[in-house]
Amino acid sequence: MSRPEVVDSVAALRAQVSDWRRDGLRVAMVPTMGALHEGHLSLIRIAREKAERCVVSIFVNPAQFAPSEDLDKYPRQLARDLDLLATVKADLAFTPTVGAMYPAGFATRISVGGPSAGLESDFRPTFFEGVATVVAKLFLQATPDCAVFGEKDYQQLCVVRQLCRDLDLPVEIIGAPTIRDAHGLAMSSRNAYLDEAELAVARQLNAILRRAAAALAAGTHQDDATGEAGRALIAAGFQKIDYVEARESLTLAPWRRDHAGRVLAAAWLGKTRLIDNVEVPTV
Ligand code: PAF
């Protein structure tokens, strides 16, 4: 198993993608911030099924972190990431520097409405601007045919879909199911911050959301179902709940009965903020 080729300049990335295109190959992209885990690897496996070549970007994007957030502490482990990329046969790793992505004088931000309203944006008001800006740049740099994003960051997936639709970016966005540990905890680079006791609490998040989704499907009013989930999270040991809400799956508008829905939540365990979401089952 050999590590993928690594490029850190847009020119080298474009040269490689052009070569593939000349050979008639379809190109997939998986944007990441590194600290790769099984969740990312599952995205790359899907990308490899959808295209003959797969580019993985590894870039901890400062534009999506607020000053109070964990930009400095965010795990960076490129050598380990490249070893993991070898196991899933990624073809190319794109590892730009902050200076290359945001050179002096950089002054453009992309703001996406629609699905970015509420949820994460109520607590991280500049987050999706940062995500949309970097994803648009990555797509214009790599010009992939398709890109794979995890449903774990469900609102992000909806925002990226909206971005491509609104800006006519010719990239097919593929949503991939969340990968969980044996106890239901969604894989996340931030799980590395949790100690053993916090991990035991974190592992209850998904079951609590599934109970809320089942209650909604069974006819419970959404304020009751999500309110009960919030109380259950506090009882489990979460210290603060940012939100537990039911939204429509496609638009993220407030959920209406008989529409496809998701229950989404963000909650704090010590200094770590965890998010998760589940589908409302259809009955
Ligand atoms: O989901 C992430 O890791 C990031 O938000 C992304 C999509 C790579 C943009 O920086």
Image (tube, rainbow, N blue to C red):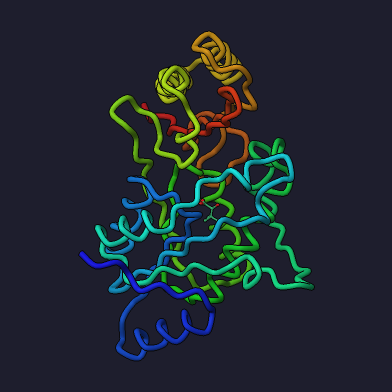
Residue 214 appears in the picture as rendered: no
Q: Quadrant of residue 105?
A: bottom right
Q: Position of residue 21 (x, y in %)?
A: 37, 86
Residue 38 spot, x, y in % from top left: 33, 45
The number of discs equals 0
The C terminus - image quarter: top left
Q: Nearer the viewer, residue 274 or 144?
A: 274
In the image, taking residue 136 as reference, residue 188 lies left or right, namely left
Q: Quadrant of residue 146?
A: bottom left
Residue 259 to residue 270: above or below: below
Q: Is residue 246 above or below residue 74?
A: above
Figure quadrant of the N terminus: bottom left
Considering only vertical position in the picture, is 106 above or below 180? below
Q: Residue furthest bottom?
A: 22
Name the residue rendered at 32%, 73% in the picture: 53
The one nearer the camera, 27 or 190, is: 190
Q: What is the x, y in percent for residue 52?
A: 28, 73
Give the percent coordinates (x, y) of residue 227.
59, 15
Residue drawn where x is 65% and y is 27% of the image: 242
Give the residue at the far left of this rendering: 1
**126 relative position to 101: left or right:** right
Camera-nearest residue between 42 and 26: 42
Q: Is residue 189 visible?
A: yes
